[in-house]
Image (cartoon, grey):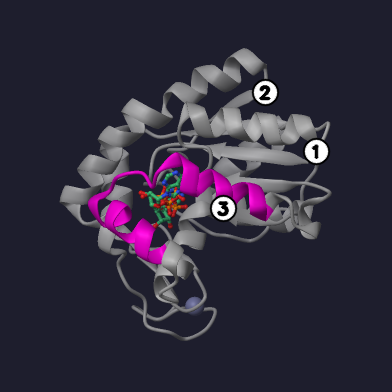
Amino acid sequence: MKIIMLGAPGAGKGTQAKQIASAYQIPHISTGDIFRANIKNKTPLGQKAKEYMDAGNLVPDELTCDLLMDRIGQDDCRDGFILDGFPRTIPQAQALDQALTARKESMDFAVNVDVPDENIIRRMSGRRVCPNCGATYHLTALPPTKAGTCDACGSELVQRADDSEATVANRLRVYHEQTQPLIDYYERLGILKTVDGTQPMDVVFAQIKAVLGKELEVSNVESRCD
Ligand code: ADP
Ligand code: ADP
Ligand code: ZN
């Protein structure tokens, strides 16, 4: 199964992708996570990506595509994968199509997690992440058991630098200009599935399960409506 998660920044792509990946036993590939890991480890790729990410702009296509194609060429991706945050531009989508065509493969689904801009602002201001293990929380919708502390590894939670209000505004603008056109792109390919991302997390997951048309194990994420 090869799945793309589409949606605005903060729509809940990562939250859903992690659950789908665990239910289908396929790797969860987040280009944002890969860039952040490179920044943390001070690699040349991280140094190149950082200035774009800090400003809320997209990392150039060439850099991003090289990274992604390399990742999906690895052994664990043979039986499928879920892409979270890639593609974000039409040229990225075309590069992905070409790479898969060369393997005589194609994507199965593009799941669009639909959330209006007003909700996005609220989602982003409440997002807290674990810098150690990558777990994501929300101050009201998915709080950790102990405030400010990761349930999974006990590290102190932080707010992502690019989740500040000014950067979020730019990221939303970039999303509408460069990423939203992908909705039509995948609609035309006949693989687009749109779900209502304003519902609580477990309801969104159930909707995705329904559109993927296969019984997935429901994990026990509890959430409240936002
Ligand atoms: P979000 O979870 O809010 O959607 P991500 O973690 O996916 O954010 O991405 C964070 C940042 O990493 C983006 O704002 C962008 O600068 C960079 N990035 C991630 N994926 C891509 C991509 N496919 N193309 C270009 N830039 C990307
Ligand atoms: P993305 O990967 O699209 O940027 P995330 O999965 O990181 O989005 O979610 C953004 C924030 O919103 C996180 O704090 C997450 O806990 C929260 N969140 C995700 N899905 C929902 C939902 N259905 N309802 C309320 N909050 C949500
Ligand atoms: Zn953690």
- Please name the residue shown 48% across and 49% down the image: 63
**Residue 125 percent coordinates (x, y):** 26, 56
Amino acid under label 3? Leu
In this view, the mark in front (2 or 1): 2
Q: Which mark is residue 67?
A: 3
In this view, the mark in front (3 or 1): 3
Q: Which residue is mark 1?
A: 214
The tag earlier along the polypeptide, 3 or 1, is 3
Residue 11 in the magenta stretch? The answer is no
User: Residue 8's quadrant in the figure?
Assistant: top left
User: Image height check: is 75 above or below 185?
Assistant: below
In this view, the mark in front (3 or 2): 3
User: Image height check: is 147 above or below 52?
Assistant: below
User: Residue 53's quadrant in the figure?
Assistant: bottom left
Q: Which residue is mark 2?
A: 191
What residue occupies the far bottom of the structure in this picture?
Answer: 154
- Please name the residue shown 64% across and 41% down the image: 206
